[in-house]
Image (spheres, rainbow, N blue to C red):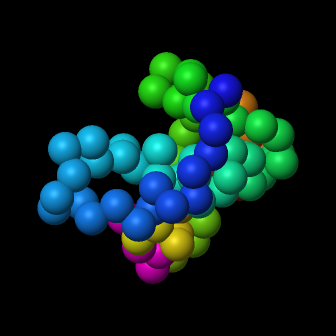
Amino acid sequence: MKVIKKDILKVNLRESANTPTLKEKLFYRQEGICLLYQGNINFDKLHENMYHIHHINPIAKGGSNFTLSNLSLTHIWCHTEHVHKIKNK
């Protein structure tokens, strides 16, 4: 696992050729922890569709689509099983 560098979020997006992806920004902000399950997120597998981006306040209820404060990075099973299936019951 890579070392978490908290200062990565201070990158000037206009000047950097290595702009972090949305999942990477959320990973660093959450310090590598899934906010639903509290388990570790593996940075090396971040882009292998093992993790979903969850809207904390749903868009249908007025939540922002791309505001970082309304997004969290979660394990795929946490997102589908614990969030969306509970709501559909």
Q: How many marks?
A: 0
Q: Residue at x 57, y 51 (%)?
A: 5
Task: Decide whether residue 64 is among the magenta residues.
Answer: yes
Residue range of the region highlighted in magenta in the rendering: 62-66
Outermost residue on the right side: it is 38
Query: Residue 19 vs residue 34: left or right?
Result: left
Left or right: residue 48 versus residue 74 is left
Q: 52 and 23: which one is in front? A: 23
- Residue at 27%, 64% (x, y): give it: 12
Residue 5, can we see it? yes
Quadrant containing the N terminus in the rendered view: top right
- The residue sitting at the bottom extreme is 62
Quarter holding residue 55? bottom right
Q: Residue at 60% across / 65% down in the picture?
A: 56
In reply to whether residue 26 is colored magenta, the answer given is no
Pick the residue in front: 54 or 10. Answer: 10
Q: Nearer the viewer, residue 82 or 18?
A: 18
Magenta span dominant secondary structure: loop
Q: Position of residue 22 (x, y in %)?
A: 40, 49
User: Residue 84, how many percent across, how many down?
Assistant: 66, 47
Residue 63, compared with residue 11, is above or below; it is below
Residue 81 visible to the viewer: no
Q: Residue at x 58, y 58 (%)?
A: 6
Where residue 75 appears, as percent x and y from the top left, is 68, 36
